[in-house]
Each structure stands twice: as structure tokens, then as C-alpha cells.
Image (cartoon, rainbow, N blue to C red):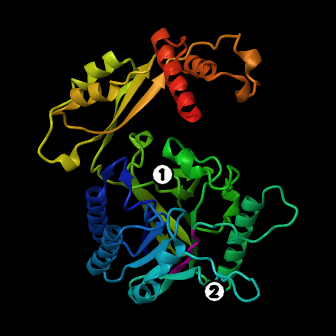
Amino acid sequence: MRILHTADWHIGQLFYEYDRSYEHQQFMNWLVQTLQKEEIDVLIISGDVFDTSNPSATSIRMFYKFLNEATKVNPGLQIVITAGNHDSAPRLEVPKPLLESSNIHIVGLVEKDEHGNFNYDKLTIPLKDQSGTIKAWCLAVPFLRMGDYPVVADCENPYTEGVTTFYQQAYAHVLTRKQDGEVIIATGHLHAQNAEITGLDISERVIMGGVECISAAAFHVDIAYVALGHIHKAQRIGGKEHIRYCGSPLPMSFSERNYKHQVVVFEVEKESIKDIRSLEIPVIVSVQSVPEKHSPIEEVLSQLDKLPGAEENGDLAPYLEVRVLEDKPDPSRRYKIEQAIEGKNVRLATINVKSVVTEVDNQIQPHAQQRLDHLKPAEIFSRVYKSTYGNPVPEEMLQLFNQVTREVAQTEEA
């Protein structure tokens, strides 16, 4: 039995102001073809199907169109979908009764019985080969929110201890159903300890105040494969070949421009797995940063001028991040950049500005603890300007600032 692991689609994401429907559709088209070509028996999607908890009708339609096409070209395909932190767990489960008749299993919510016991049976999904024989069991664990995991008394980290206990109890439950010759697979949408992160993943990681890192030891050694989602860079965890993030299929930020976007495929044989391999996803629309390092505006404009001319298909033009280094404010910055890229084969997404900051004047330090109401507005403005740009406020700008504060004061008095 052959299984494909993917995650973090983020359907409906706006890349800055740009709609990514074209890219998501192309990825899904590629995935349908891959499911057929690779003769995949089970597709696992480990969370963050959608980018928001309230996706648009277009995003929902795109996803269900994919499910329809995937099961048509591969009638025996089983699909396991779990909710991520971006998904609305209840909303994701709405079509569950209808889809289960098509071997599509959606797990968004962690349910409890009237006694407060977790319903691990709901998360335990048999995976069958083309003959209908159970080859594996999937612990389909969604993103665990507060209340979705056991409370462990007298522990240092209630979240990590609770999530670890949840997986231990879920594993114990699946053992009551597992027969000889069957393997156990688990999913998870979480931040694993020592996972490599950059850019957008930094904001993705902080779910529980930065204390939510889950050790690879949380997953029992006899779990054959752990299909993780949440971190966008494909990687192994804890040096284990079988505990993996597959990564996002599309770049979600400019920090991901050098990522190898992929899905992971592996085979189940008796009570083990074999032939774990990654399939690289074709880049639909690239992201690029110009220049590589933040540079003064003159150098930036010179490099932008060297960009290739525009092509006919604007949907394929790369997203552009422009990196500027400044020693003073430049109100005309955006206009200069837009003029420089006019007619170029790029779409401006963002201007990333860094300021040249010299060593802060030692005379400022003794006043660091002063209350704001003891400082005049001009003094605060001067300090912020110097700490940002490393230079004193230009006299003309300071005069303009003082003029504005006087006008504001007069308005308040009136």
C-alpha cells in the first residue's frame, strides 16, 4: 500500500494583495496526476487546508473539486484530512457524513463522552489496500487546542505534557484494534522540538506563548510514520526518517524562496514502511528578493533596472520583495521603485526597509527609564529618530514636527 503525505495548503491565501487561486489550482492539478501516476492508495493532508477559518466559497469549491477529481481518477483512493490551526474544525467537518461514503475521512474536532473521556475511536481510521484488506491504522490527530488534551497534574509544561499524554493514550487505544501485520501511522499539526524554521514559520510557531514544542519522543517508537504539518519547511525530526514535515506546496513567504516544496511518498509492507521519498512540486510562481542584501536605494534601483521585461502571462510573473537600506526617511521610495519595475516581469509584493543604525549615544541610556509624560513630544521624536537611523533629526524636519504639535495643541484647546 502506497501513501502520500502533504499539508499546509493554505487555500485562499492572499500573498500580500495577490490572489493565489491560479497557483493552488495548478498544484491540485499536479497532485491529481501524481496520485494516478504513483498509484497512491492513501492521501494524508495534515492540517491547514485553508488559510482562514472562514474560507471563501471559491476556496471551498476548489477543494471539493479536487476531492472529486482525485477519487474519480483513483477510485480506490482513501483520503484522511485533519484540521490545522488555520482551519475551523467544526466547519471542516460539516460534509463529513457525505464524504465518508467516498472513503474520505475528515477529523477536525476532538470529542469527549459524557464522562469527559476522549473519543479516540473517532480518530482511529483503518487504511485498506485495493483488495479491502486493512494494512494500517491512522491516528488522525488534528491541531490540539486547549481542552483537546489531558490535564497532567504537577507538570512543568501543561501543553507539551498534555499533548504527549494524548498521543500515548491514542496509541494505546489503536493497539486494541490492530492485528498482526498491520502498521500504525499518526498525524499531527504542531511544532516539533528542534524543527528548523524561518520567516513566516516564526509566527506560525507561537501558538501557546512559545512553550508548545513537542519532542519526537511523544510518538511511540512503534509508530511507523508520523505525518506532520504546521512548519512549512520539509524536514525530518529528531534524526528520525519516519517523523517528517512534508512542508507547504507553495511558498508562503519570501523566506521560503529557497525551500524545496514537496510531498512525501512511502510504502507499507507488513509491520513496517519502506521507500520513503520526496516528490518535488513544480514551482508555479516564484518569489524573489532584490537585492539579496538590503542596499541603498540607488543600488536597488540599478538592480531593478536589470530585471527581464514583462511576459504575456501576468499570473506567472514572480512576486517581488524589494530590500532597501535607509539612513533617513524617503517619502518617494515607493514611487521610485514602481517606476523602476514598470514593464518588468515581476509583481511588487512588498518593500522591506531596514534602517542604518549606528551605536546609540551613551547620553540617551541614563534616561531610558523616564516616564513618557516627563518628556516633551519633540524629545521623544528625536530619540526615536536617532535610534532608528543613527543620526540626529534634520533641523527642517524637527521644525515641521514642532509646527504639527503646536497645531494639535491649539485644536485641543479650541
Which residue does the numbered mark 1 point to in the structure image? 232
- Exactly how many numbered labels are in the figure? 2
Looking at the image, which residue sits at the far left?
A: 312
Q: Check the image and name the residue furthest to the right.
A: 154
Contact between labelled residues 1 and 2, with CB atoms less than 8 Å apart? no
Position of 345 compared to 109: left or right? Answer: left
At which x and y percent is residue 375? Answer: 69, 22
Within 10 angstroms of label 1, few (less than 14), some, or many (20 or more) residues?
many
| 2 vs 1, front mark | 1
Image quadrant where one finds the N terminus = bottom left
Residue pictured at 21% horizontal, 50% vertical: 315
- Up the image or down, 344 lies above or below 93; here it is above
Which of 16/293 is in front? Answer: 16
Residue type of the residue flagged with mark 2: Arg
Q: Quadrant of the C terminus?
A: top right
Residue positioned 30% across, 43% down in the render: 286
Q: How far across and how far down the image is residue 88, in percent? A: 51, 70
- Residue assigned mark 2: 177
Mark 2 nearby-residue class (10 Å; few <14, some 14–19, many ≥20): few
Q: Quadrant of residue 346?
A: top left
Counting residues from the N terminus, which is met first, the one under dot 2 or under dot 1? 2
Q: Nearer the viewer, residue 9 or 227?
A: 9
Q: Quadrant of residue 277?
A: bottom left
Q: Amino acid at mark 1?
A: His
- Tell whether position 100 is magenta: no
Q: Secondary structure at mark 1?
A: loop
Residue at 19%, 32% in the rendered image? 342
Residue 278: quadrant of the picture: bottom left
Read off the magenta span.
135-142
**166 shown above or below 263:** below
Q: Position of residue 325 (x, y in %)?
A: 43, 21
